[in-house]
Every structure is written in C-alpha cells, then in structure tokens.
Amino acid sequence: MATIPKRIVIYTRDIENITGRKRRTCQTILEKIRKRYNKNKEQFITVKEFCEFMKIEESLVREFLH
C-alpha cells in the first residue's frame, strides 16, 4: 500500500476543521495570508505560512492534517 506524503499546502476545509470557523471566515483568513505574503489568489498557502500567521505551532497542525 502506498503511503501518502505529507502535504505542504493548506486549504479552506483544513482551516475549518482546525479552527471550527465557518467557510467564509476561513476564506477570509486565506485572503489575509495571501496579502501578507504578496501572493495572488492562484497561489497556494503553505502550512508554514498559515502557522506563522495564526501563531500556531506547526507540529500541532501537521499532526492534525496527518
């Protein structure tokens, strides 16, 4: 059985599950992160960028995503 590699990007649904916030709020969070890192809407947000922005330990988020 193939192993699933660890993801490096985070999606709206992941943020919903991590924070318990509604979809639109999580989309707004992603928009704010993109603005901070000067990314356009087609570019991905990494787990590291999300953690730095939200001040959450990356290990906690990675454990949750795995």
Image (cartoon, grey):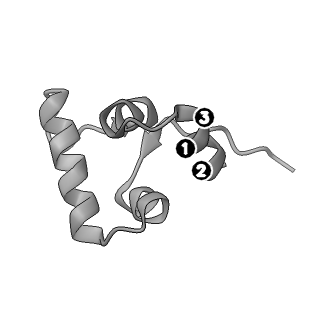
What numbered label is drawn on residue 65? 2
Q: Quadrant of residue 7?
A: top right
Residue that mark 3 sits on? 59
Q: CA distance from mark 3 to mark 1?
A: 5 Å
Residue 51 image point, x, y percent:
41, 35
Of residues 65 and 53, the one nearer the viewer is: 53
| Position of residue 12 in the picture relative to residue 56 (left or right) | left
Contact between marks 3 and 1 (CB within 8 A): the answer is yes
Q: CA distance from mark 1 to mark 2?
A: 6 Å
Taking the spot 13% from the left edge, 27% from the top edge, the residue there is 38
| Position of residue 63 in the picture relative to residue 18 (left or right) | right
Q: Amino acid at mark 1?
A: Val
Q: Quadrant of residue 15?
A: bottom left
| Position of residue 66 in the picture relative to residue 26 (left or right) | right
Residue 42 image point, x, y percent:
21, 43
Q: CA distance from mark 2 to mark 3?
A: 10 Å
